[in-house]
């Protein structure tokens, strides 16, 4: 698929313009401040005795919600930290802030 002509004309001017703006800001003593990234809510399903998604990257302030999508009770348990969701019945959920988690792995138990 070919890019429209206006994209080809517009995109090459973005990078030099951004570099020029950053350079002028530096000369004027202006600082570029990175805006904070808003916290996100991640959902992890417990299904067929596995987590979906199997891997998840979270940032400070993010919240992870575990939902039991199996017909049998499960728990979400930290591998390296003493946190545990307690028993989650079918369709029950539990959430935890990333600020409270230090583990890099979790396990599912029935």
Image (spheres, rainbow, N blue to C red):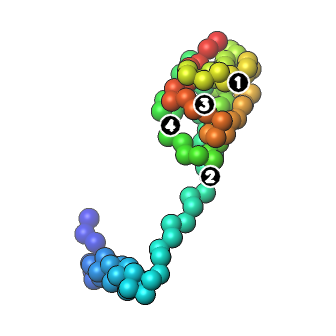
Q: Nearer the viewer, mark 3 or mark 1?
A: 1
Residue that label 3 marks: 45
Q: CA distance from mark 3 to mark 1?
A: 13 Å
Looking at the rendering, which quadrant does residue 109 occupy? top right
Q: CA distance from mark 4 to mark 1?
A: 17 Å
Q: Residue at x 51, y 70 (%)?
A: 33
Q: CA distance from mark 2 to mark 4?
A: 14 Å
Percent coordinates x, y for residue 71 in the rendering: 68, 17
Percent coordinates x, y for residue 58 in the rendering: 54, 42
> Which of the two labelled residues, at mark 4 and mark 1, occupies the earlier sequence position?
4
Q: Residue at x 51, y 30 (%)?
A: 104
Does residue 87 appear in the picture of this structure? yes
> Which of the two labelled residues, at mark 2 and mark 4, occupies the earlier sequence position?
2
Residue that label 4 marks: 56
In the visual, does 73 lie left or right of 8?
A: right
Q: Residue at x 70, y 35 (%)?
A: 95
In the visual, does 94 lie left or right of 38?
A: right
Looking at the rendering, which quadrant does residue 17 occupy? bottom left
The image quadrant where one finds the N terminus is bottom left
Residue that label 2 marks: 39
Residue 29 sits above or below residue 38 on the image: below
Checking the image for residue 94, the label placed there is none
Q: CA distance from mark 3 to mark 2?
A: 20 Å
Residue 5 sits above or below residue 107 on the image: below
Please say if the residues under marks 3 and 1 sit with CB atoms less than 8 Å apart. no
């Amino acid at each position: 698929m070919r890019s429209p002509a206006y994209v080809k004309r517009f995109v090459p001017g973005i990078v030099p313009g951004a570099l020029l703006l950053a350079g002028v800001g530096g000369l004027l003593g202006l600082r570029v401040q990175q805006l904070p990234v808003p916290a996100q809510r991640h959902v992890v399903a417990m299904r067929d005795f596995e987590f979906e998604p199997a891997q998840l990257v979270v940032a400070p302030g993010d919240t992870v919600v575990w939902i039991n999508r199996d017909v049998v009770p499960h728990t979400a348990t930290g591998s390296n930290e003493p946190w545990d969701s307690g028993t989650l019945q079918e369709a029950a959920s539990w959430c935890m802030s990333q600020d409270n988690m230090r583990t890099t792995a979790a396990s599912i138990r029935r």
